[in-house]
Amino acid sequence: MASPAHDPGPALDQDGVRLTVDDAIATVTLTNPAKRNAQSPALWRALAEAGRRLPGSVRAVVLRAEGKSFSAGLDRQAFTPEGFDGEPSFIDLARGADAELDATIAEYQEAFTWWRRSDLVSVAAVQGHAIGAGFQLALACDLRVVADDVQFAMRETSLGLVPDLTGTHPLVSLVGYARALEICATGRFVAAEEAVSTGLANLAVPADQLDPAVHDLVSAILAAPRDAVVETKALLQGAQTRDYEAQRTAERAAQGRRLRDLAGLGE
């Protein structure tokens, strides 16, 4: 999505993350294709900061990545004794107190949580490899459009770890417990056709059509009134935890708010 000529420039550009805003659309781009957009604590902090910097005008957020791979996952440097410059290594974290370890992982997770805010619709444009943390980052978004060369894989279990960057909840919600367990326990690749058929992806297109397809989807979402989309998203998110009667009640309350607003009777 090209920025207009009057665009003042990126709202954020650091540690492999660039945020640009064009009125109602924000674009978050992973910008380290030389390392296949491998992830690190610095990148996670930049992603969290991107979420904090979104202006109120933004209704849709596109997550994309430069290069042939969306994200190859966690940078393996994290597992070396040295870790990353200026960061505690994962080995050091493992030796620390439980509370400190929990707080650090919670901080990392913040990069993956804001994408499902009820006032936004987030769309991930995913090409090539989306492995481990890359898979979980794609899962953090509401919707996923994938290139026909996409390769999802959850490799944490194979490394003796677990997916801890908020990916387990959406994965089970999308594909069900049994398939989610099989994907995680085997670490196998999930290609475009399976991703669409199982609900991991909304749409698969040739790689050269990925950006246009995302643009068309976002444009269709923006065509609906913002408040109606916000209320609908909140209803659908809540349906996962409400029983049938509670969902009926929530629908009535939301529709009441919409009708009053349309009649000019809103607060």
Image (spheres, rainbow, N blue to C red):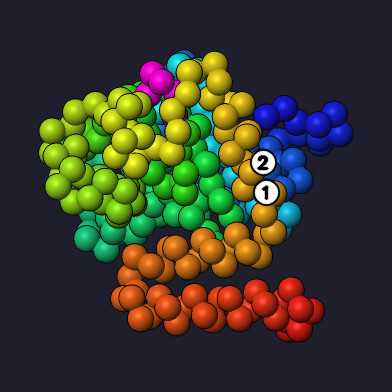
Q: Label 1, label 2: how many angstroms apart (C-alpha)? A: 5 Å
Q: Nearer the viewer, residue 97 or 223?
A: 223
Disc 1 + disc 2, Cβ < 8 Å: yes
Q: Splitting the image into 4 quarters, where does residue 61 fall?
A: top right
Q: Nearer the viewer, residue 160 or 67?
A: 67
Q: Amino acid at mark 2?
A: Ser
Q: Residue at the spot x=18%, y=51% of the render?
A: 177
Look at the picture and state if 153 lies above or below 56: above
Q: Position of residue 234 (x, y in %)?
A: 50, 66
Q: Nearer the viewer, residue 134 or 47?
A: 134
Answer left or right for 173 relative to 161: right
Answer left or right for 227 relative to 154: right
Q: Residue at the spot x=41%, y=68% of the render?
A: 238
| Residue that label 1 marks | 222
Q: Amino acid at mark 1?
A: Leu
Q: Residues within 10 Å of mark 2 (few under 14, many from 20)?
A: few
Query: Magenta stretch: dominant SS?
Result: loop
Q: Which residues are magenta?
A: 146-150
Image quadrant holding the C terminus, namely bottom right
Secondary element under disc 2, as helix, strand or loop, is helix
Q: Position of residue 196 (x, y in %)?
A: 36, 34
| Residue that label 2 marks | 219
